[in-house]
Amino acid sequence: MKSHDPMQKKRLNSKIWIIVLVIIIVLLVIFLAWKSSNKKQASSQNAETLSSNTKPSLTVTVVVPELQNWKQNFTANGNIAAWQEVVIGSELSGQRITKVNVNVGDSVQRGQVLAEINSESIRAELATAKANYAEAKAVLADAAINNQRIQQLKNTGAISQQEATKYLTSQSTAQARLDAAKAQIDSNQLRLKQTQVISPDHGVISARTATVGSLAQTGQELFRLIRDNRLEWRAEVTSSDLYKLTKGMTAHITSPDPQHSAVTGTVRMIAPVIDPQTRYGLVYVDIPTTDAIRMGMFVKGEFDLGQKPALTVPQTAVLLRDGFSYVFIVNKDNRVTQQKVTIGRRFNDRIEILDLPANTRIVASGTGFLADGDLVKLGQTIPDTPLTKQLVAPQEK
């Protein structure tokens, strides 16, 4: 048994080495097969990529930016208010209103009677004053005659100087009483005139608190009057935009009623101060008489700042992605480059580009299907207006 042990061990070791060698050969074959498969797959992918890169992804229309002369404006909001609103009140106190002739919305003329106040007691006082005046006038005439007679006798020595002075004083007193009676008549005539509440100017009644039977008090508001029925738009404008405006500029105010067109006004005055709380300044715009807007409305409007050139492209050429605007520039090799741009004003189906070089060929539409570096096939080229062509001003919105 001991004589066969070395031989068996030798045979066992040989078998083990043969098994290991076979395993190594099998693993090597598997590795070579896997590597060959990867090479074929990579070659296939490269071929597909090459094929896709050489094949145009989309047929596009190319457009060149157009230079147009667009109207420049900016919007603002503000209240519609009266140019001047007059408060009409009573100048009498303690008298009842007997008649009201107008109501809110009525057009009135200068000097028109708006309301009447009870005048019976004032007329009675006026009659008393006239009677007192007549009495004072008779007393003055008698005093004047007596004084004239005494003055003639004074030179003869028949009466004393003191007596002559007494008659002269009586005449002066009678004259003073006559003047007081005349002043009383004037005062009562003025009060009688004040029993009629008169319109101080042409305009429209915007408010009325006067009612028949109520007691009128001095300074009490009875009516409010929009002078000349003239309204204005008080636009609230930021301090930066305030310097863009000048007197005489045109403003277009939008009516809340869609059946009415925009109301055109003119800048009359620009406020000299800025509100420290809101940082807005007021711009006063005169507006014509119209039913499209009414006092108290809060409306939006646009200020016309004149015309300014704009480099424009179709809105379909601009792609909005991740909150930014992009266009696709077509290169000489018909590949597109995605470029970020800054947009400005809009008008109809066109949009202003602020940082795009002139004479740049860009994709006009279908930008949502493109990616940076794509190969495209050029279809129709739209020859937008060249930079040397006369500028065309679009009509107002």
Image (tube, rainbow, N blue to C red):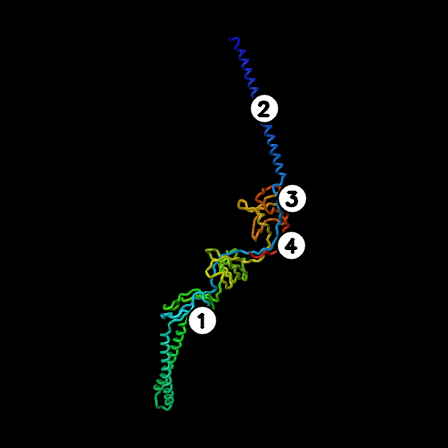
Looking at the image, residue 257 sits to the left or right of residue 214; the answer is right
The image position of residue 325, as x and y in percent, is: 56, 47
Q: Quadrant of residue 7?
A: top right
Whichever of callouts 4 and 1 sits on the residue coming sooner in the sequence is 1
Q: Amino acid at mark 2?
A: Val
Tag 4–tag 1 contact (CB < 8 Å): no
- Is any part of residue 236 visible from this angle? no
According to the image, label 2 marks what residue? 29
According to the image, label 3 marks what residue? 332
Tag 4–tag 2 contact (CB < 8 Å): no
The image position of residue 254, as x and y in percent, is: 51, 58
The image shows residue 306, relative to residue 62, as above or below, that is below
Residue drawn at x 61%, y 33% is 44
According to the image, label 4 marks what residue? 389
Asked whether 301 or 40 is in front, the reply is 40
Whichever of callouts 3 and 4 sits on the residue coming sooner in the sequence is 3
According to the image, label 1 marks what residue? 112
Q: Amino acid at mark 3?
A: Lys
Q: Amino acid at mark 1?
A: Gln
Q: Amino acid at mark 4?
A: Lys
The image position of residue 166, as x and y in percent, is: 35, 84
Whichever of callouts 1 and 2 sits on the residue coming sooner in the sequence is 2
